[in-house]
Image (tube, grey):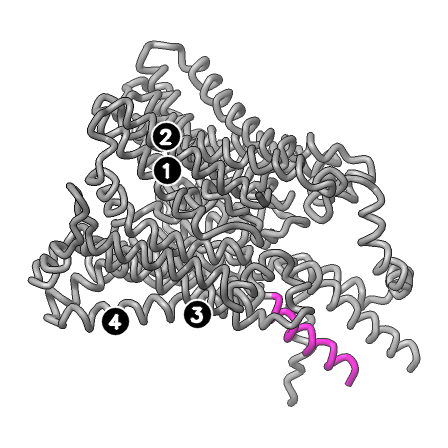
């Protein structure tokens, strides 16, 4: 029997988002191999526990970031400042709640701070037309300084149980961060897929000038994605601050922007802009977290974490690489012609 | 006076004015010693910034430099202290490793057509991870050569120009000549100006890109050597965030992040300005160190806004780039010649549908690449119709 390789390649390349789901499946499989009780779930005090839940819970902040980051990258931009925005939002929340401000107001103000940061980035990119990587580098560099200004250089801790519940609480058996991430994912999807906004974002990412000629208000679209990214980062900042019941302006969300960008790229959204998938970016964030958890469970030193991560990134990039794509496509075409 | 030098002049003027201001504020500031210390303290940053200047001039970016510095310090500490290798051999080894690492990233960027941002991000994780593997502790280096090299200096009046400061100055001088006076430098500028035109003009794109990242990796390793001399230790968490400081210095120095325009000397001034802010805060004593970050951020913003302003004011094209005529001048040719596009649109062949699915998760491919693929498929479907 002859193996019909072109047909297999053809069928496989027809499956949508194969690399992402395949990657997640593979990582989870490896996790299960190193730790057989990986998929065990148990109910305790009205909340599910288990490694799988842990992956979801720990992956939530990066997933939150990747929601906004996907939209930014889809317009051909990039947002390096999200880590700093996490620090600023966390610092704001911790300082305010420590001063006795009601929790609802604190949450609102932290989100408003994130919104303002996003607006600043958006202004620089869309109105002043500064390159996104530089424009957001400004806030990335200065943002941690601002956060330290808010906390006066100290690590502010708080005891407010309501704010802490954002990270440690649970609903329907699921931890709060997971639910928040799911909610924001739904909101983002509704925003970009139930309206024409997603189409406009893709149009701007593919060719800003021609989409402007087509009647899209490109400035508003670009402004909006950075505002959304700032908002998502502020939510992640709230979750992270609630998680440690404090704000560490130096280390909160440090290098998280890179993880977020990575999950977007793993999710198959091109850094050049254009077509995007918010859901796949979240899957990308889960892949990253599943790897981290797997390494912890396997008993390897956490030092291996970065190496495994870089190898996985390289493999995923190889799979998605245009050069390799050309080879695969070539094989398909040859098969058909024959 | 050529107006091309204006950003460079403004950057230099900001530094000179800033230094004057600091000297008025603290009367010990305007001494040779303080200036020499400024050079010594920022030596590793300056060396790595020269490599970054080349990378950014070519339109790329290298996020791995901070990790390579950390790896170099750890590697030196382990080889010299634990394995008892002679330091000079260890220096040579680490330079070779850095250069090969950079070359590998350059090759991946060019031959696999992947964005430099992501490739060097992976490189950043890899280098940091390997240094974590070597050791997570800070290892002091107590080899006698280290103290000899650290004591080596040229006395100038009351100050002393240390060896590592001299190394930085030499790297800047060589970098300046390489960028502005050699064929390689011209190629780098050509790449940053327009990759496609550079390729059509016969610039060896692949070789140049690989050399650029080799240079950056090698200089990062050299900066690692300097950093290990400076701290006399190897630590895997050293120099975190150096890549962003370096990029900021390059931008403050007047180099366009899109590539194709800038000066190595500007980067030198950019480094000095960052060092000046830090020294000022040290002198003041009451200001907290986080003001450095805010000040650098404000400066970044000021310089970028200035660059935009100058671009708009100078070039008639700065304004015209948004106007209609230029668009048609550049875009009309391909659209008129691609009659096959209409054919593609009309084709309801299953092949084109499959292609649509395929590109769903494949659009990491550059758009030009995707278009090329489409064309080949169109040819195939045309062939099939003939049959």
Residue pointed to by mark 3: B104
Q: Mark 1 lies on which chain?
A: B
Secondary element at tag 3: helix
Residue bearing mark 1: B273
Mark 1 vs mark 4, CA separation in Å: 32 Å
Q: Distance between the residues labelled 2 and 1?
A: 8 Å
Chain under numbered label 3: B
Q: Position of residue B225 (x, y in %)?
A: 24, 60
Q: Who's the residue at 44% across and 32% down the image? A: B299
The residue that disc 4 covers is B92
Query: Neighbour class for label 4 at 10 Å: few (<14), some, many (≥20)?
Result: few
Task: Give, as a single range, the part of the protein colored magenta.
Answer: A322-338
Residue B18's mark? Answer: 2
Q: Is mark 2 on a helix, strand or loop?
A: helix
Mark before the other along the chain sequence, 1 or 3: 3
Q: Residue A287's x, y, as percent?
A: 46, 53
Q: Which is more toward the observer, A223 or B148?
A: B148
Q: Determine whether B86 is above or below A166 in the image.
A: below
Between the residue at mark 2 and the residue at mark 3, the CA separation in whole angstroms equals: 41 Å
Mark with earlier residue (4, 2): 2
Mark 3 or 4 closer to N-term? Answer: 4
Question: Would residue A36 be seen by someone viewing this image from the given angle?
Answer: no
The span from disc 3 to disc 4 (Cα, nearest Å) is: 18 Å
Instruction: Compare marks 1 and 4 and give the one earlier in the sequence.
Output: 4
């Amino acid at each position: 029997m002859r193996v019909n390789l072109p047909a297999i390649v053809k069928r496989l390349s027809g499956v949508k988002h194969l690399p992402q789901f395949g990657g997640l499946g593979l990582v989870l499989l490896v996790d299960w191999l190193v730790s057989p009780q990986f998929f065990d779930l148990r109910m305790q005090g009205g909340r599910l526990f288990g490694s799988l839940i842990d992956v979801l819970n720990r992956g939530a902040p990066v997933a939150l970031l990747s929601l906004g980051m996907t939209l930014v990258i889809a317009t051909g931009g990039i947002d390096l400042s999200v880590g700093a925005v996490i620090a600023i939002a966390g610092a704001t929340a911790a300082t305010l709640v420590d001063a006795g401000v009601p929790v609802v107001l604190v949450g609102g103000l932290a989100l408003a701070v994130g919104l303002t940061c996003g607006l600043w980035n958006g202004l620089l990119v869309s109105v002043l037309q500064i390159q996104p990587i530089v424009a957001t580098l400004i806030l990335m560099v200065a943002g941690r300084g601002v956060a330290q200004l808010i906390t006066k250089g100290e690590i502010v801790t708080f005891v407010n149980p309501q704010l802490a519940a954002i990270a440690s609480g649970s609903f329907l058996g699921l931890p709060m961060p997971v639910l928040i991430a799911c909610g924001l994912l739904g909101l983002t999807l509704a925003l970009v897929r139930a309206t024409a906004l997603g189409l406009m974002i893709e149009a701007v990412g593919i060719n800003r000038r021609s989409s402007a000629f087509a009647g899209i208000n490109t400035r508003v679209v670009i402004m909006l994605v950075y505002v959304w990214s700032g908002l998502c980062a502020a939510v992640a900042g709230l979750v992270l601050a609630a998680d440690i019941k404090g704000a560490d302006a130096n280390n909160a969300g440090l290098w998280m922007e890179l993880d977020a960008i990575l999950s977007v790229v793993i999710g198959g959204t091109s850094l050049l802009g254009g077509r995007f998938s918010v859901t796949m970016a979240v899957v990308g964030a889960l892949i990253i977290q599943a790897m981290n958890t797997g390494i912890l469970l396997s008993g390897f030193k956490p030092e291996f974490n970065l190496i495994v991560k870089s190898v996985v990134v390289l493999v995923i990039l190889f799979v998605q690489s245009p050069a390799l794509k050309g080879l695969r496509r070539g094989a398909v075409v040859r098969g058909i012609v024959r | 006076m050529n107006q091309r030098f204006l950003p460079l002049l403004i950057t230099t003027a900001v530094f000179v004015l800033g230094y004057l201001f600091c000297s008025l504020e603290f009367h010990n500031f305007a001494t040779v010693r303080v200036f020499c210390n400024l050079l010594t303290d920022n030596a590793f940053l300056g060396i790595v910034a020269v490599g970054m200047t080349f990378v950014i001039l070519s339109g790329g970016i290298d996020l791995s430099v901070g990790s390579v510095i950390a790896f170099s310090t750890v590697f030196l500490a382990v080889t010299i202290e634990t394995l008892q290798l002679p330091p000079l051999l260890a220096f040579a080894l680490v330079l070779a490793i850095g250069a090969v690492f950079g070359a590998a990233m350059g090759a991946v960027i060019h031959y696999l057509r992947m964005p430099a941002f992501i490739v060097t991000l992976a490189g950043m994780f890899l280098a940091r991870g390997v240094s974590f593997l070597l050791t997570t502790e800070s290892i002091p280096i107590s080899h006698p050569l280290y103290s000899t090299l650290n004591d080596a200096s040229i006395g100038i009046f009351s100050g002393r120009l240390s060896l590592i400061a001299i190394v930085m100055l030499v790297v800047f001088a060589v970098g300046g000549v390489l960028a502005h006076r050699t064929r390689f430098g011209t190629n780098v500028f050509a790449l940053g100006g327009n990759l496609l035109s550079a390729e059509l003009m016969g610039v060896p794109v692949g070789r140049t890109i690989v050399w650029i990242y080799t240079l950056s990796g090698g200089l990062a390793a050299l900066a690692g050597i300097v950093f290990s001399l400076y701290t006399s230790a190897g630590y895997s968490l050293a120099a975190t965030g150096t890549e962003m400081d370096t990029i900021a210095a390059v931008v403050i120095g007047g180099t366009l992040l899109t590539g194709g325009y800038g000066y190595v000397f500007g980067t030198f001034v950019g480094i000095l300005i960052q060092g000046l802010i830090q020294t000022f805060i040290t002198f003041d004593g009451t200001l907290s160190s986080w003001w450095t970050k805010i000040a650098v951020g404000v400066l970044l913003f000021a310089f970028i806004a200035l660059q935009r302003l100058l671009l708009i004011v100078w070039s008639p094209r700065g304004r015209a780039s948004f106007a209609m005529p230029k668009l048609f001048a550049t875009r009309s040719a391909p659209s008129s010649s691609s009659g096959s596009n209409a054919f593609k649109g009309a084709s309801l062949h299953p092949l084109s549908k499959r292609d649509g699915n395929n590109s769903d998760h494949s659009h990491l491919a550059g758009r030009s690449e995707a278009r090329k693929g489409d064309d080949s498929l169109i040819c195939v479907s045309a062939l099939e119709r003939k049959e």
